Image (cartoon, grey):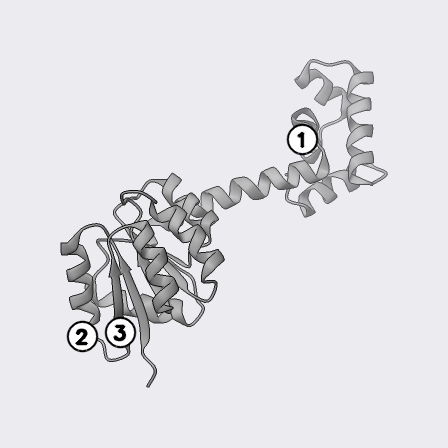
Amino acid sequence: MNKIKVLIVDDHPVVRQGIRRILEMENDVEVVGEAENGRQALAGAAALQPDVVLLDISMPGLDGIEVARQLKQTCPETRVIVLTVHEQEQFLFQAVQAGVDGYLLKDLPEAELAVVIRKVSQGHSVLDPAMTRPLLREFSALAKSRVRRQNFLTEREIEVLHLLAQGLTNKEIAGILHVSDSTLKRVVRAVCQKLRVDSRPRAVAEARARGII
């Protein structure tokens, strides 16, 4: 049976020893090396060609984010799992942008570590459950922003669409927004042109279909 080759990267010897102890109990996992900083990690990965790198973020010299970014360029077949104490969203987003295959917190139950390594070595991506909410929130915000950019709609045009969706008349909407009827008609006409429809109901339907409102 081919074992999963793992390189452990952490600047704390006690942490590295603890991870090694956990993984050495697994028949299908082999710790092929350790590194205490980013430079050693890159050199070790190039020499040992591990299947998986367990990578801390906070290290002297190159931090884990930069190491992950470089590993994805120099060792594209190697899977990278961040194992860290950092729960801040900024580290998660930076790690995802760097191309990591997993992001785990160090309070992960010992029994789960080998399970995650197996999943990642098989091509899956794994995220610590505690980090799911901020990532989904960020993706949701990006998706909404992308939709708005794609449609070139202004905030006022989107506001008008929301009011149109409520079935309000032009006069009612103009009163709510404190604009003239002619100004509102220009906004509605612009919305229809941008959404490539020829009526208010179709504009509302198209906006809903695109997730704008």
Q: Is residue 86 left or right of residue 170?
A: left
Please say whether residue 133 is visible from this viewpoint.
no
**Displayed quadrant of residue 30:** bottom left
Report x, y in % for residue 143: 58, 44
Q: Nearer the viewer, residue 24 or 200?
A: 24
Residue 98 in view of the camera: yes
Q: Mark 2: which secondary structure?
A: loop
Classed neighbour count for the residue bearing mark 1: other residues with Cα under 10 Å, few (<14), some (14–19), many (≥20): some
Residue to which mark 2 is pinned: 25
Foreground residue, 9 or 164? 9
Q: Position of residue 1 (x, y in %)?
A: 32, 86
Q: Nearer the viewer, mark 3 or mark 2?
A: 3
Count of numbered marks: 3
Left or right: residue 127 versus residue 159 is: left
Which residue corresponds to the image point at 45% horizontal and 69% vertical from the top-left? 123
Nearest to N terminus: mark 2 or mark 1: 2
Residue at 73% in and 39% down? 204
Quadrant assignment for the C terminus: top right
Q: Residue furthest right?
A: 198
Q: Which residue is mark 1?
A: 158
Q: Is residue 196 above or below residue 20?
A: above
Where, by quadrant of the figure, is residue 82 drawn? Answer: bottom left
Q: Describe residue 142's horizontal placement relative to residue 170 as left or right.
A: left
Q: What residue is shown with label 3?
A: 30
Tag 3: amino acid: Glu
